[in-house]
Image (cartoon, rainbow, N blue to C red):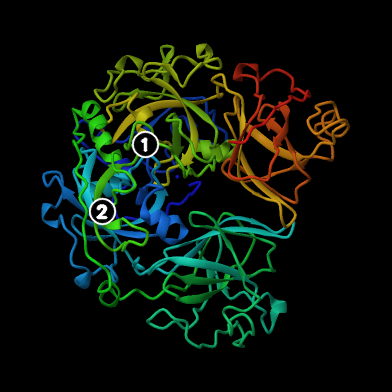
Amino acid sequence: MLTLAALVLAALAVCGGCSRTLAGAPTTPANSSGQGDLGGWAGGSPDLSVPVVASAFRFGTAGAVGVSPNSPLVRLTPQSGCGTCLEVVCSKPSTACVNPAANTLPSAVSNDTANATSNVLSPGRLILTVADTCLSCGPLDLNLHADAFAKLANPAVGIINVTYRQIPCPSFGRNMSVYVSAFRASQGGYLRLSVRDVASDGLAEVAVAHCPRPQDDDGGADVTGSGDTAANSGATPTGVSSTGVTRTADATSRSGGLIPGCAGTLRGPIWRVMDNSVGAAWEYSGLPRLPLDLRLTGVGGQELIVWNAITNTTAPAVYRTRNQFSPVDPLGDFMMRAMAAATMMLAALALWGSWPCSLAAATEAVNSTVLEDLGAWAGSSPDLSAPVTAGAFRFGTAGAKVVLANNSCEYGPLTSPYIVGISPNSPLAKLRTQSGCGTCIELVCVEVGGGGEVGGGEVGGGEPSAACVHPEASTLPPAATDLISGAPSNVLSPGRLVLTVVDTCETCGPLDLNIPLEAYQQLGNPALANINVTYRQVACPSFGRNMSVYVSDFRASQGGYVRLSVHDVASDGLAEVAVAHCPRTKADNDTAAVEGCTKNLRGPIWRVMNNTAGAAWEYSGLPKLPLDLRLTGVGGEAFIVWNAVPKPKSPALYSTTTQFPPGDALAAAPTEEATAAPTTAP
């Protein structure tokens, strides 16, 4: 579904969240029949204001583990910890652990993780991959998705103790793959990618090149078709010794010839080292021609070339390779590492039935761990293979406020609990602008098997479920009388909320929702893994706030590049963002009308940005600062935000004095008036 750091790579061979069954929980998910079962949202152009019934889950993406930004894993491993593997067991209380006999980690010398074929090493003992952050976690705490949590402990228990350590990642029999999240061929070229399923100790460096082919006029790409967006790479690795040091090898092109300065000299000048901008994301502007080759360097010194790693300009795209780092020998590697364990006792367990009382106590105990209290991981250069003991949470349960740092919509850090993740197959994602990001939904908790049809003037019906905390609020008002545009908060009434789409849930059914705990517990019993909800798309209220502009990336060099998103957009959302430096008649902050800029909102001075992913808008080849933005809503309204980006700073959040009219004003004619918006950087 960061960031920021965005990043969901780990996989567990376990059942999806939609099919979990707990005592007191719905035993039949509201939507379990696959992508085709869309209820009132079926068809090519459904009315998204029509309510549908589906399951809602606590926040998380299956297989991911989140760590604190203060974790030594983040500070001391490459890619801010992203892609790091952990070996984890449940240690306390033994009554909650699914396998009480597996409450300790085996000796490192006899460890069997290097050749693991699955994330489940044995009952109650897992390998998890760091793919997210948990801003409210203590420095040693882990934030687990419920699927992984259930492989360790009773899923009705909210908090357990775990013992874990960093280990070299097994390959699980898979080769690496390259995920391209952004690619632009124009304006010098720009590339943003991450490398998945990296075995051994992880990536230390990624470099890009177009290695000259002896017959380069034919494109040089040796690829085969695949079921993915892109093709299966015909790459061959360079020679790598068992110690991880590159040995002399003749890496060849398609025609078999040695390429001076590319394969013959892995550190030759043709290679351009990419920027590890955030998490597992690597970026570069000013690209060579396609196909692109990648040089991957591991932490242990292993190096290999992925030939034809990126063969076209498609984004997003996944390219499978034939490459993988050699596994780390556990005997040779771990004999040099100290074995230790630190214990952090939790004050209480959040048990079903006593959750509201025990959650605060348990959270206080977990978050009482300070940076200095790191057990075996204390100090500036700790041995991260040494086990430590800390709290493990199901996603979204750590702390009074869960901060979503790594959302796929790329809004940057979000502190509001009134957010939601949707399936990539959701009609909201397919039919709304920004892939559904920024869309608002109104929802209530409904009974198991509650209907989704409109009848008797209300949506839903039947006896309320015991899962709902406000059974009297199990129906949505008729749309004609449901005027929420002036709502002062996301809580319209007890048990009836407005949530904003900010993330994806890859394991959700097409109508399912993934909801953080704070919002979830205002709808249903927080001890339950899932509830049924009725929801519909609504025009977003402003909640009394103006829009703000979040700049996630800004480069002044190489012609200039900006990547941004717009927060708190009222009404029906953004359809277009354009950037300019409007000529000022007197001074840079003068908002007087300027020909071709404000008098003609569609004038040639405006450069329409690219909506590359989620709510992210990008542009290369920038005008001078400060940058003005022209925001166009789905309903046709257009505003200019003066001085929207005044500095070459990122990340940065700039407030505005601009907002779209409420949803019930969509019929009004689009405005052509510029709205002044002083901006401030955080």
* Residue 185 numbered tag: none
Give whichever of discs 1 and 2 has the lower sequence position.
1
Instruction: Give the percent coordinates (x, y) of residue 264.
Output: 58, 85
- Secondary structure at badge 1 equals loop
Q: Which residue is mark 2?
A: 375
Circle 2 packing at 10 Å, graded few (<14), some (14-19), many (20+), is some
**Residue at 40%, 19% in the rendered image:** 496
Instruction: Give the residue type at disc 1.
Output: Asn
Circle 1 packing at 10 Å, graded few (<14), some (14-19), many (20+), is many
Instruction: Give the percent coordinates (x, y) of residue 325.
Output: 42, 73
Instruction: Give the percent coordinates (x, y) of residue 375.
Output: 26, 53
Closer to the eye: label 1 or 2: 2
Q: Is residue 469 above or below residue 10?
A: above
Using residue 372 as the reference point, say whether residue 222 is left or right of it: right
**Residue at 70%, 79% in the rendered image:** 216
Using residue 292 as the reference point, say whether residue 336 is left or right of it: left
Residue nearest the viewer, comparing 346 with 491: 346
**Residue at 50%, 47% in the rendered image:** 4
Instruction: Give the residue type at disc 2.
Output: Gly
**Residue at 50%, 46% in the rendered image:** 3
Residue nearest the viewer, comparing 525 with 297: 297
Q: How far is the residue under mark 1 from the one under mark 2?
A: 45 Å
Whether residue 272 is visible = yes
Q: Is residue 554 above or below residue 293?
A: above
Instruction: Give the percent coordinates (x, y) of residue 581.
Output: 79, 39
Residue nearest the viewer, comparing 245 with 469: 245
Q: Is residue 254 above or below residue 469?
A: below
The answer to which image quadrant residue 196 occupies is: bottom left
- Secondary structure at badge 2 equals helix
Q: Which residue is mark 1?
A: 31
The answer to which image quadrant residue 180 occupies is: bottom right
